[in-house]
Image (cartoon, rainbow, N blue to C red):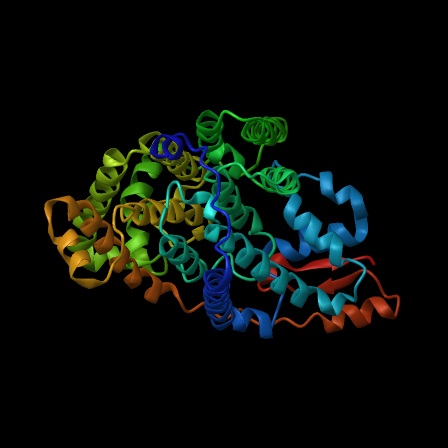
Amino acid sequence: MSSDVSAGRTAVPSPAPGPARLRSIVRLGIVLAVGVALTLVRDWGRLAHPTLRSEDGPIFLKQAREDGLRAIVELYRGYLHLLPRLVALIWRALPLNWQPGLYAWSAVLIGLALAAMALSARTSWLLPHRWQREALFLLLVVAPSRDEVSGNIANLIFVGALGLLFVALRRDTASRAVAWGEAVLVAVLALSGPGAVFLAPAFLVRAWRQRSRQSSLLLVIVAMATLLQWGTLAINPRTGDSSGSPSVWVGYLARRAFTSAWFGANHLTPLWHGWWPLLAPATVVLVTILGLLGWRSRHRIVFAALGTGFLMASLVPCLAYYFMADSDRAQRHLLLPLTMITIVLLSGLSGLSGLSGLSGVRRLAGLRGTLPALAVAGLLLMLVAIGRDFVLSSLPFKPIGPAARCLATGRAPCLVHSNTSEWDFTLNR
């Protein structure tokens, strides 16, 4: 059986019968309820007083209403944004003054659903204990660096990359319907931003581990989406995004990409000025822990693929934006790297049968428990980052009612206000 697990071909265990099955369902329900409650508490300000934010208005809402289905193939910033386009098209027939709320709720619920993918037993080859997968789900719900992406559909392309990551880490399913549904999901997410490029190595490793038609199909979808996204970007290059450099990337890795996992992404830059003697060695310690966990794991090639994706996801924005290393902006680019860090730390606990009791303490204290102890320390320190970033900043409420009344009286074009004036736009219908 161990050889099958290492090859990634072990079948998902059948559901436990009787009372055990009931306890399993109740436990899942409790974990999901806690995740939903934490999400609502954290995002309530965005949900109770929704307002259009950044591209949600002038790009997705406007083009969905005025261009219809043609909006699906319209490029923005050089590539396709299929998931945000689909959300905007689904709600376009409903009243205009409902749109900000529908966008906010859709973004939050989609993000929650993608985080819940972490609970799947099909990742048990990597996270064998159920509590590891439950912890991953809950850590994603309260993860740092969510202020920029919460409650808006434009940044679903970055949240969607997490869904791609979880599919890449799954075993094959015996259900044909689930397999095809997964293929459709991968296609949608892969055509929504650049995430497929960063996760192509992970899908390659899945296809190598499984050696199945199912995993090979997913790899083909990701490869085709990668070629399409970067082909359109080459033909329609972004303008004004060439101020970055490799040196920015080095600074970003040192000052933000890793440090955010322990100290949060909000106000991290000013924190460096006063606390650099603490933050600099903390970054080195975290990188060392991650390196040791990856190197000592029997899934070394998987972590190599994740590391490659981590570096690619960090490099691309740093070649475009000069401010990536020394700014709190563009937190959206931290979502995927921070999730990868969390997965590696949780995987370091795979050798433990439990975290309670005298035996668990002995295992953590013993020689064999050195790496698990480091993983526990890393996860506990992540609570600092979670606490610093948990509260989301409030958005200026810009009611859309005046624009809706303007359109109703036939006085188009009508001005629509977004969260900031630079994203204000007009609607013709």
Q: Is residue 109 toward the left or the right of residue 315 in the image?
A: right
Taking 310 as reference, is 339 above or below it? Answer: below
* Residue 139 drawn at (x, y percent): 39, 58
Q: Is residue 281 toward the left or the right of residue 98 in the image?
A: left
Q: Quadrant of the N terminus?
A: top left
Please identify the residue farthest to the front as the structure is shown: 18
Q: Quadrant of the C terminus?
A: bottom right
Taking 410 as reference, is 77 above or below it? Answer: above
Of the pair 206 and 342, the residue shown nearer to us: 206
Quarter of the image where one finds residue 102:
bottom right
Question: How many circles with numbers are drawn on the protein?
Answer: 0
* Residue 186 drawn at (x, y percent): 59, 39
Residue at the location (63% across, 26% down)?
235
* Residue 311 drawn at (x, y percent): 37, 35
Of the pair 382 and 13, the residue shown nearer to us: 13
Residue at the location (21% across, 53% down)?
279
Please identify the residue farthest to the right as the structure is shown: 410
Of the pair 207 and 414, the residue shown nearer to us: 207
* Residue 243 drawn at (x, y percent): 44, 37
Residue at the location (36% across, 46% down)?
128
Taking 345 as reference, is 383 above or below it? Answer: below
